[in-house]
Amino acid sequence: MDFHEALNWRYATKKMNGEQVPQEKVDKILNAIRLAPTSMGAQPFSVFLITDQEIKQQILPIASNQTQVKDSSHLLIFAAWETMTDDQIQEYVDQTAEERELDKSELDPMKKGLKNLASKSKDEFFSWSARQAYIAFGFGLAAAAVEKVDATPMEGFDNEALDKLLGLREQGMRSVTMMPLGYRDEENDWLAPMKKVRRPSEKLFIKNEVPELT
Ligand SMILES: Cc1cc2nc3c(=O)[nH]c(=O)nc-3n(C[C@H](O)[C@H](O)[C@H](O)COP(=O)(O)O)c2cc1C
């Protein structure tokens, strides 16, 4: 299945069948998330992997009882950071210098840029870091489709309650999205037979349109 067939195959699965996704497929999906581009390469988010059925049951009511939470094989929770500490910035600079065999001083502009971001308020930083998390989230969804693993993009949950359950605020993070991975229960999923609905290309893509110069 090529990439475009995979994108047509995938859909926001509403009912999963509880089957386990093989670890090698999960690893490929996680690697796509890890390889996603982010601003300055900072990857200012963490992804929690939940496989424990009891924890999923606790998350279920927080996610309006959307059953994919409990019927998934792996539940991924994307949490964006509220800031980057000096230690986190230094760790990133050191790793980059080592892996690219650079002098650390060559990375001063990058370090300055990150420190500047980190000096912003928690809300401002989170607004930036959440956008980075969404890029990785998209990569994960696409990778799952290529692996023929169903994945539901989910924002329909109580962020504050989930942050509380997972102790995210104490760790300087806030939940952004969830991605249950599993397999569709084709017979019982009302959405499975439905056609994909998308805006027509002519409306979505605007070609060479600029206002007249006066
Ligand atoms: C960021 C985001 C949040 C979403 N939240 C939910 C959700 O909480 N529950 C759900 O069943 N679907 C959710 N969806 C699925 C969308 O409704 C779905 O992707 C859209 O209608 C397009 O359909 P398709 O993904 O099946 O192609 C979400 C999608 C995105 C991208």
Image: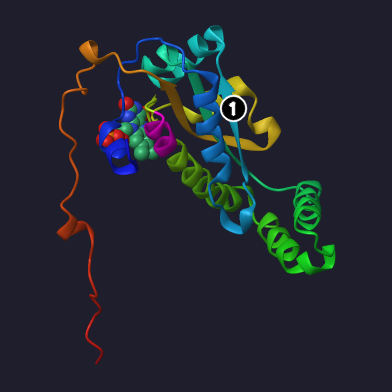
Q: Which residues are magenta?
A: 141-147
Q: Is residue 145 magenta-colored?
A: yes
Q: Please, is residue 54 above or below residue 3 in the view?
A: above
* Secondary structure beneath label 1: strand
Task: Give the residue at the far bottom of this rendering.
Answer: 214
Give residue 61's position: percent from left, percent from top. Answer: 43, 14
User: Which residue in the protein does label 1 denote?
Assistant: 48
| Residue drawn at x 57%, y 23% as measured from the top left | 49
Q: Please, is residue 159 above or below residue 111 in the view?
A: above
Residue 59 visible in rendering? yes
Quarter of the picture for ligand 1? top left
Q: Is 106 left or right of 150, judged from the image as shown?
A: right
Task: Give the residue at the far front of this rendering.
Answer: 1
Which SS does the magenta portion mostly show? helix
Q: Is residue 199 magenta-colored?
A: no
Residue 155 visible in rendering? no
Mark count: 1
Depth order, front residue of 131/72: 72
| Residue drawn at x 41%, y 30% as measured from the top left | 147
Q: Please, is residue 20 above or below residue 162 in the view?
A: above
Give residue 115's position: percent from left, percent from top. Answer: 73, 59
| Residue drawn at x 42%, y 26% as measured from the top left | 157
Instruction: Tell me the quarter of the image containing the C terminus.
Output: bottom left
Give residue 166's position: percent from left, percent from top. Answer: 61, 22
